[in-house]
Amino acid sequence: MSIQKNRCWECINCLYRIDSTYDDEWSRKCPKCKNELIFHVPQVDSWKAIVTDLPGIWRYYNLLPLFSPQHIIALGEGSTPPVESKRLAQLLGVRRLWLLPQSANPTGTFKDLEASFIIAKCREWHLTRLCWHSTGNTARSYRHYALKAGIQNVSFYPLNCAYKWSGASHHDDALLFAYDGPFQQISTIAKNLRRGGVLSTLRHWHGN
Ligand SMILES: [Zn+2]
């Protein structure tokens, strides 16, 4: 694997750049103006020079803000085989057309692409207990990867979405809680667990 790793964060406001060894990478706050830091993706002249021989999304490891490849949990996400659709090609008036079915990912959703990265990042941060809340796909995917990584976790989901969890098996290290109430209240529960120091919630890193 050729490593040309970018290790730079950049402030969205003052454009101040810092190295990834920045102590508070978790909060992603600019030390100068306290605005948000984003990972600075370098301009790529040649894809061949940047891609790795790792599987799936990890081909683009050099462009991702993960700095310890030993933390990668790769389960085949992003390696879904393309399927040619002659009928759709005909309908759209193009010669040939391929689809990339994301249902072929480990938990049957494109969420596996982000889960693989997020859980690897959690390992890099040495987080050992996590919680999240979602209506279904996100939490199921994160739960799956966290279990593979040996990270204890708690998933909260709305009771009216229980049908999405019908196939989920119980596990001592991956608790499931169905909440009979508005989704916003589930968010509050997860945040309170974090404030209490019990668990780390990924919601703020997740971006919403
Ligand atoms: Zn700044």
Image: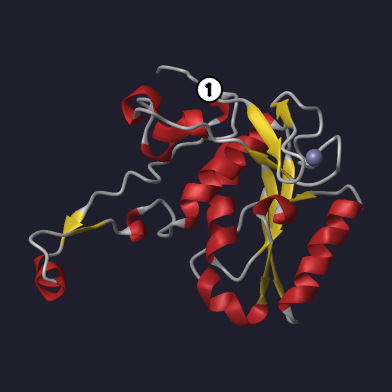
Q: Position of residue 123 (x, y in %)?
A: 65, 33
> 177 left or right of 196?
left
- Tell me the amino acid under the disc marked 1: Lys
Quadrant containing ligand 1 reads top right
Q: Position of residue 132 (x, y in %)?
A: 69, 58
Residue linked to disc 1? 5
Is disc 1's CB within 8 Å of ligand 1?
no
Split into 4 quadrants, where in the image is the C terminus? bottom right
**Eyeballing the image, is 147 above or below 42?**
below
Residue shown at the point (36%, 22%) measured from the top left: 49
> 44 left or right of 184?
left
Q: Nearer the viewer, residue 169 or 64?
A: 64
Q: Position of residue 99 (x, y in %)?
A: 24, 59
Residue shown at the point (75%, 33%) measured from the top left: 16
Split into 4 quadrants, where in the image is the N terminus? top left
Evaluate whether residue 147 shows in this view: no
Q: Quadrant of residue 94?
A: bottom left
Local crowd size for mark 1, using a 10 Å CA cut-off: few (<14), some (14–19), many (≥20):
some
